[in-house]
Amino acid sequence: MSLKLFNTLSRAVQEFAPLDPGGKKAGMYCCGPTVYDFAHIGNWRTFVFADLVRRTLEFSGYDVRHVMNITDIEDKIIKGVRENKTTLREFTGKFETAFLDDLKALNCKEPHVKPRATEYIAEIIALIEKLVARGIAYQASDGSVYFSITKYQAFPVTNMRRNPSPISRSGRRASRTMATFSGPVRLAKAGPAGTSNAAP
């Protein structure tokens, strides 16, 4: 029996088909924890479900490569580091370790790859620069950079709620945007929004 999943992009139930030409391998990416605190039961619903999907794919005969990122830099983490007068790694390390211990306690399989956000800052900024240059992202007045869903044609924007106030105090133009970098951030190349030539 074929495996069928609900595709949130097409808004329909579709038969699973791996990108692997041989049909034997399946890549699985899951958004991981933001390690500024201990994970709670609401968080674990996501990770237990991801484990169920992985086990289902493996049971179906696929060679699964499971990747889950660790978000170890963001506003709450920076605040916690300052308040506790410690280093970033010391602050996030205890929560990351606790998360992996809890993952094991719940009998969830550990992802094969667990990249930390701080290990890819240069790549993240380079990607944001490309989005700004293409007009798909813009920099708000507070320095944050937002991805404009309405300008990305592949995104099903008709299913998203409209924002009655198109511009917020931060300079964010609409609710149909997603933050790519919470400001202020200075990009290396000038884009449509007038970004500056500097490092973050």
Image: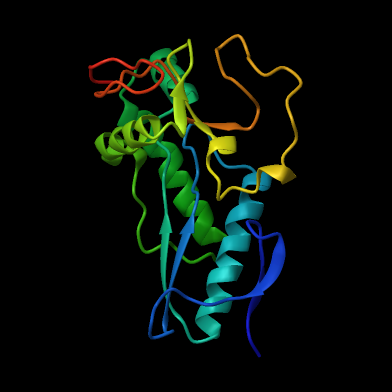
Q: Position of residue 36 (x, y in %)?
A: 48, 31
Q: Identify whether 7 is placed above or below 55.
A: above
Given residues 55 and 194, the one toward you in this image is 194
Q: Residue furthest bottom?
A: 1
Query: Does residue 114 sit above or below 70 in this rendering?
Result: below
Quadrant holding the N terminus = bottom right
At x 29%, y 34%, the residue is 121
Q: Can residue 181 be seen in the rendering of this structure?
A: no
Q: Is residue 53 left or right of residue 191?
A: right
Residue 115 x %, y %:
34, 49
- What x and y, as percent, mark residue 177? 58, 31
Residue 110: image location, x then y, percent = 44, 62
Residue at x 47%, y 45% (from the top left corner): 98
- Which residue is more in the foreground, 59 or 35? 59
Instruction: Quadrant for residue 192, please give it.
Output: top left
Q: Is residue 31 left or right of residue 120?
A: right
Horizontal side of 38 relative to 119 (left or right) equals right
Q: In what quadrant of the picture does the C terminus appear? A: top left
Q: How is the image coloured?
A: rainbow
Q: Nearer the viewer, residue 175 or 37?
A: 175
In the displayed structure, does residue 27 sit left or right of residue 105?
left
Q: Quadrant of residue 6?
A: bottom right
Q: Residue at x 38, y 86 (%)?
A: 22
Residue 180, quarter of the rendered image? top left
Above or below, 122 relative to 84: below
Number of marks drawn: 0
Residue 88 vs 61, above or below: the answer is: above
Q: Residue at x 39, y 77 (%)?
A: 20
Residue 131 at least partly seen: yes
